[in-house]
């Protein structure tokens, strides 16, 4: 969303970011396009890495047990058996809590990390496989999130200006945040021309996507500040860890699944 790096260093990480995106985005699109077990397998791989990142970031032990549990949790999603999925999720939460240090904050962090990661990946799966046009819903929302990230990154660095939340994330600016919202509103309008539905609903959905994505990013930044780390990991050159990369998409998936389930008219207004 913008930073305060010197002009000569601005965009210095852009080639790495683009290369990473060129590898990661096709993989994500293919998994979402295929859905079912393909998506569950992709979610399992991402979930395992994110759990490892969380354990190392928060100093939660037993990561070698939590990671396999996260894989089983994701692979249970296509079974459509809530008892199995809930049991695996509960077991991972209990393990995260009990394996942490005895301090209350450490135990909370151990359990919260599991809930945080599992919620993001499972809601992406439900968004794709839910009782609406899941493939279209997931692909549109993913593209909106990427448009929001790109607009915030480029316009934030070009325009700079006042910082958004200096204490939580000093590199983010109002110019980047506002540019991201405008970009997503335009994406919503374009999606309406392609898919139909209600233009107001699509534009509003675009705005919501940007707001939720940025909120998820800020939330992740606050967590990293809490644990005094710059990045959640280093697996993605130019981006940091997977948690750094999917925090916005995860937040959007959670919020839109809740929206679609609680307001059945919402998918209909979007022609989904």
Image (tube, helix red, strand yellow):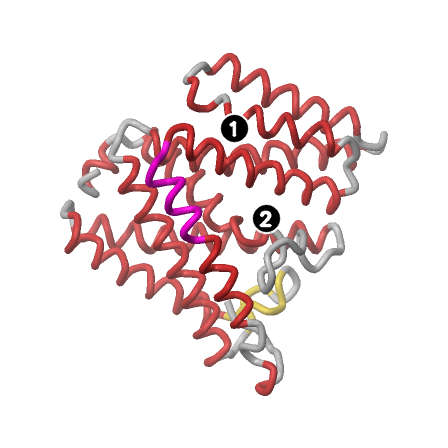
Expressed as whole percent of the image width and height from the top left, the position of residue 116 reads 58, 37
Q: Tell me where residue 156 appears, x and y as whole percent.
A: 48, 73
Of the numbered discs 2 and 1, the one sitting upstream in the chain is: 1
Q: What residue is rendered at 65% in x and 28% in y?
A: 68
On residue 105, the disc is none
**Residues in magenta?**
25-35
| Image position of 243 with respect to 106: above or below | below
Residue 201 relative to residue 212: left or right: left
Q: Residue at x 52, y 49 (%)?
A: 246
Work out whether residue 88 or residue 20 is closer to the camera in this orientation and state it: 20
Kindly identify which residue carries mark 1: 74
Q: According to the image, label 2 marks what residue?
A: 243
Vertical position of residue 259 compared to residue 222: above or below: above
Instruction: Assess whether mark 1 and mark 2 are in contact (beta carbons under 8 angstroms).
Output: no
Q: Position of residue 108 (x, y in %)?
A: 72, 33
Residue at image location 55% in from the left, 25% down from the top: 73
Tag count: 2
Rendered view: 176 above or below 115 = below
* Chief secondary structure of the magenta portion: helix
**Secondary structure state at the residue bearing disc 1:** helix
Quarter of the figure with residue 143: bottom left
Spatial CA distance of label 2 from label 1 is: 17 Å
Q: Which structural element holds mark 2?
A: helix
Above-or-below relation of 200 to 124: below
- Please tell me in which quadrant of the rendered image residue 171 appears: bottom right
Q: Residue at x 62, y 84 (%)?
A: 6
Q: Quadrant of the C terminus?
A: top left
- In the drawing, does residue 212 fall left or right of residue 3? left
Between disc 2 and disc 1, the foreground one is 1
Residue 31: which quarter of the image?
A: top left
Task: Confirm whether the magenta stretch covers residue 244.
Answer: no
Crowd class of label 1 (few under 14; some 14 to 19; many from 20; radius 10 Å): many
């Amino acid at each position: 969303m913008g930073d305060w790096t010197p002009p000569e260093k601005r965009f210095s990480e852009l080639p790495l970011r683009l290369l990473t995106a060129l590898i990661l985005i096709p993989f994500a699109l293919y998994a979402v396009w295929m859905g079912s077990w393909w998506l569950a397998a992709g979610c399992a791989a991402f979930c395992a890495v994110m759990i490892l990142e969380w354990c190392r970031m928060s100093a939660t032990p037993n990561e070698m047990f939590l990671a396999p549990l996260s894989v089983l949790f994701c692979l249970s999603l296509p079974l459509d058996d809530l008892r199995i999925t809930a049991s695996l999720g509960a077991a991972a939460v209990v393990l995260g809590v009990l394996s942490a240090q005895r301090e209350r904050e450490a135990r909370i962090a151990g359990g919260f990390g599991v809930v945080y990661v599992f919620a993001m990946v499972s809601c992406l799966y439900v968004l794709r496989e839910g009782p609406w046009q899941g493939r279209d819903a997931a692909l549109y929302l993913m593209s909106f999130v990427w448009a929001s990230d790109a607009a915030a990154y480029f316009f934030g660095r070009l325009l700079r200006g006042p910082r958004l939340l200096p204490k939580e994330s000093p590199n983010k600016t109002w110019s980047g945040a506002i540019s991201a919202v405008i970009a997503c509103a335009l994406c919503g309008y374009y999606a309406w021309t392609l898919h139909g539905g209600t233009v107001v609903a699509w534009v509003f959905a675009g705005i919501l996507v940007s707001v939720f994505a940025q909120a998820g990013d800020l939330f992740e930044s606050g967590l990293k500040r809490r644990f005094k780390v710059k990045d959640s990991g280093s697996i993605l050159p130019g981006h940091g860890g997977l948690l750094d990369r999917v925090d916005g998409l995860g937040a959007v998936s959670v919020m839109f699944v809740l929206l679609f389930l609680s307001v059945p008219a919402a998918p209909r207004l979007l022609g989904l």
